[in-house]
Image (spheres, rainbow, N blue to C red):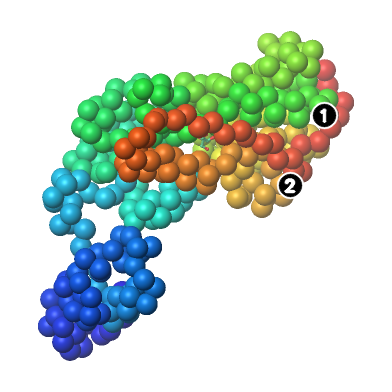
Amino acid sequence: MSSADPAATPSPATDGRPVGINEVAAHAGVSAATVSNVLNRPERVAEGTRRRVEGAIAELDYVRNSSGSNLRSGRSDSIGLVVHDVTNPFFTEVARGVQDAAADEGRAVVLLNSDEQAAWQSRSLRLLAEQRAAGAVVMPIDDDMADLLWLRKRDTPWVVLDRGDVGEDLGCSVTVDNHAGGLAAGRHLIGLGHDRVTFVSGPLGIEQCARRLDGLRAACEEGGLDPDRAVRVVEAAQLNPRSGEQAVEEILAGGPRRRPQAAFCANDQLALGVLKGLGERGLRVPGDLSVVGYDDVDVAGLVHPGLTTVAQPKYELGRAAMRLLHSELADADHRHQRLRFEPELVVRGSTAPATTHPTL
Ligand code: RIB
């Protein structure tokens, strides 16, 4: 972008009008087709010619106008990305992966939040259809495919991310094995000798939360514990720190004799709120209670003690989803795929071996 003073004399080639591809071609001494190749298929242009054209683009401050091609195709080049809540750093990192992969293909990303609300999800997908988005990466709020089927009927391809293991006849999906994540967290805590664990969940209607709980219960069974006795569930209103802080009252209900030895939280945001709430009540982590989170967002490694958590490949999830969408947009022989990533336990200072606690 030229940093020239807007009041300066406009470039002689344009007298203030936007520079067109023909002016660039004339300036570089090549055809307009060659300029187009430099922009779209630079590998087909000899290096010397390419450099001359790139120099002309810079000198004339030429910016490609994609609206023309969009008018002809009836589609924009943009990609829609619908996440639950971009203020949660999990989604921010996923969005960065989508955006970087989209930029590799010369595409912009339109970011929308569903706030886990069906009405907002529907509205977001309708907005993308109205704006003729080329395609969408969607983190569905549940397994109801109606919105996504509606979008596909309007020839807008999509990839579902993080939830909604859709059939390969419908579209591509990228998910992480949430059961494996819960199992890893459970094995870690049971391995430390904990046999009273509170699972601090978001709304259990959220598939990821339910699957993580299943994994924790499976770890109890594997460790010879009765999951109905070893695991207690506290369902927070939302997957955010405030809800985690509010959940502490219920986690500690019943007094020291009924206090859990550990809290496994459905995501790091809840865990951060739980850490705050425990600290405000004078309880030490991990001395009085071990805490495990899920996601491994940056702040998990910055708090003290560091948060033991289950890492999800957030950035890679976003890139992989965008690459699958690009394949559907660009490859005539595209076949839908279901990619599944594995989570990984990251042990930090918020968990420690069980100490003797008052028995139940
Ligand atoms: O932190 C946001 C959570 O919502 C993540 O664990 C992600 O998997 C989604 O379930």
Q: How many marks?
A: 2
Q: Quadrant of residue 117?
A: top left
Looking at the figure, which quarter contains the N terminus?
bottom left
Using the image, determine if residue 195 lies above or below residue 287.
Answer: above
SS for callout 2? loop
SS for callout 1? loop
Q: CA distance from mark 2 to mark 1?
A: 17 Å
- Mark 2 = which residue? 305
Using the image, determine if residue 200 lies above or below residue 304.
Answer: above
Circles 2 and 1: CB atoms closer than 8 Å = no
Foreground residue among 238 and 215: 215
Residue sticking out furthest to the bottom: 9
Picture coordinates of residue 186, whole percent (x, y): 71, 25
Which numbered dot is residue 315? none
Q: Could you tell me which residue is drawn at 67 percent across and 49 percent down?
A: 301
Task: Say which amino acid is labelled 2.
Answer: Pro
Picture coordinates of residue 296, whole percent (x, y): 62, 43
Q: Quadrant of residue 4?
A: bottom left
Foreground residue among 198 and 340: 340
Looking at the figure, which quarter contains the C terminus?
top right
Which numbered dot is residue 192? 1
Whether residue 314 can be seen here: yes
Name the N-terminal-most of marks 2 and 1. 1
Task: Say which amino acid is labelled 1.
Answer: Leu
Q: Residues within 10 Å of mark 1 (few under 14, many from 20)?
A: some
